[in-house]
Every structure is written in C-alpha cells, then in structure tokens.
Amino acid sequence: MEGARSMPEFSSQVVAVTGASGNLGRAVSTLLAQAGAARVLLDRSPQPEPVENPDRTLAAGGLDLADPEAIAAVLDQAVQRFGRVDGLVSTVGAYAGGAPMHEQDWAEWEAMLTANLRTAVAACQAVISHLINHGGRIVLVGARPGTAGVGGMAAYSASKAAVLRLGESLADELKSRNVTVNCVLPSIMDTPQNRAAMPKADVTRWVPLEDVAQVILFLLSDAARSITGASIPVYGRS
C-alpha cells in the first residue's frame, strides 16, 4: 500500500539551484520550498517565475550560467541575506543528437559541452568557497548515456560522461572538508518537450520529474552525509 512520502527537513538550509526555471529545476525548487529550505534560484531567463515562499527565496534571472563570476555574485547576495549557503543543485543541461558523429560539426560539440559541462563547472567553482569552511552538498545532473556511449549521441554522451568525472574528482578533493558531491543519472524524463518530440512513446516507462527531484533532495539531506562520489541511476522502467 502506498503512503505519503516522508520529506527531509531543510528549514536551516540554504540551497542554490541553477537552471531553476527548467523542468527539473522547478521540480527541485518546489520540493525544497515544501521542505522549508531557503532557496537561491539562478536562471538565464530574464524574469524569474513567481516563486513559493518569497521571503525565503532569492531569485536571479538573466544570468550567464557558464560564468562562475555571475553565479558567485548572486551567492554573495544570498550570504548577505541568509547568512550562508549550504548546497548546490546544478540542473542546467541540453540535448542534441541523432546525426552520426562524423556528420556533427564542432558547434554541436561545443553546445553540448557548454550546456552540460561548463555550466556545472561554473556553478561548482562559484559555490565551493562557501562550503569548505562548514561543509555542504553538491548534486550534479548526469544522464544514462553518460555511462556508456550511444550511437547518434556522441557529443551528448561525452559531455555527460565529463559531468560524472567532474563529480567524482570533486568528491575526492572535498571529502576532507565535509562536502559531498554526487550525481543523479536520469534516463528519459517525462517533460512536455520529450512528449512533443516522441508522441508515440510509452510515457509510463519514463521517469517523473518529481522522482528525480526526490533523489536529489535525499542527496542534499543529512541522511546522505556518508555518500559522496556516487552516480545514482534514476531509470524508472526504461
């Protein structure tokens, strides 16, 4: 019998979410609000969407999320307002694929590396100085194709594989500072864009956004304090 899911308690935590107006970013930020966290919502959209708990939210739009200095400036504002930053969820990403690798020009590779890897690097570079003195949590978003190359997805697979190696390297660097770094690995997530792109697919086999967000919240929580350097599959029935 299904029951209500228990939710970690975050009332004393300040968590930054990059890509906050994206599908997964919204799911994560909503759960954080429900759990009582103070949130720092960062996005490239010029006008952040209306948010829950505005008194516990700092929302910044129009940002270049591949620029660590732009992110760091907002995190400094968050420290002034909330006193500290305890965690980061980097949800920024993009997908392009379908063509054989020898037909992809470098522009597609650069787009995938920027959207999936460079944004994660920038977010981590901006937040780490806020975490190393008191500990904290970093959660990155990889993808199933990052674990093994897939035909027609060379640039995407390589960029997501790089995110996994980034997370593992940071976990090793930061473990003595009580900072955990983990990745979640969704397969196909149930988003409006994926439904439009694959109208005949069996969406019941896809992963609900909230399920991915729940795993992220667990990795941010104190219950996951001994988990670092992990890549957690969230594949649903796919």
Image (cartoon, rainbow, N blue to C red):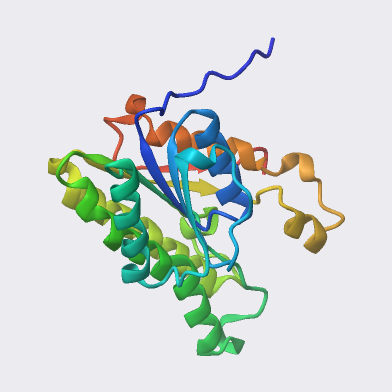
From the top left corner, tell me how far across and down residue 220 is, in percent: 38, 36
Left or right: 169 in relation to 149: left
Quadrant of the frame with the C terminus: top right
| Location of residue 222 with respect to 73 vertically, above or below | above
Q: Measuring 61% from the left and 88% from the top, which residue is drawn there?
A: 103
Q: Nearer the viewer, residue 233 or 41?
A: 41
Which quadrant holds residue 194? Answer: bottom right
Left or right: 77 in relation to 114: left
Left or right: 169 in relation to 147: left
Which quadrant holds residue 230? Answer: top left
Q: Residue furthest top?
A: 1
Q: Residue furthest right?
A: 200
Q: Nearer the viewer, residue 18 or 51?
A: 51
Quadrant of the frame with the N terminus: top right
| Location of residue 177 with respect to 105 vertically, above or below | above
| Location of residue 16 with respect to 135 vertically, above or below | below
Question: Could one spot residue 74 in this view of the protein?
Answer: yes
Q: Measuring 30% from the left and 45% from the top, which residue is drawn there?
A: 85
| Location of residue 11 with respect to 27 vertically, above or below | above
Question: Could one spot residue 121 in this view of the protein?
Answer: no
Q: Measuring 29% from the left and 40% from the top, which residue is drawn there?
A: 228
From the top left corner, tell me how far across and down residue 189 is, in percent: 66, 49
From the top left corner, tell me how far across and down residue 91 is, in percent: 50, 55
Left or right: 185 in relation to 192: left
Q: Nearer the viewer, residue 136 or 235?
A: 136
From the top left corner, tell me how far across and down residue 229 is, in percent: 30, 45
Q: Measuring 82% from the left and 52% from the top, which residue is drawn there?
A: 201
Figure disc tally: 0
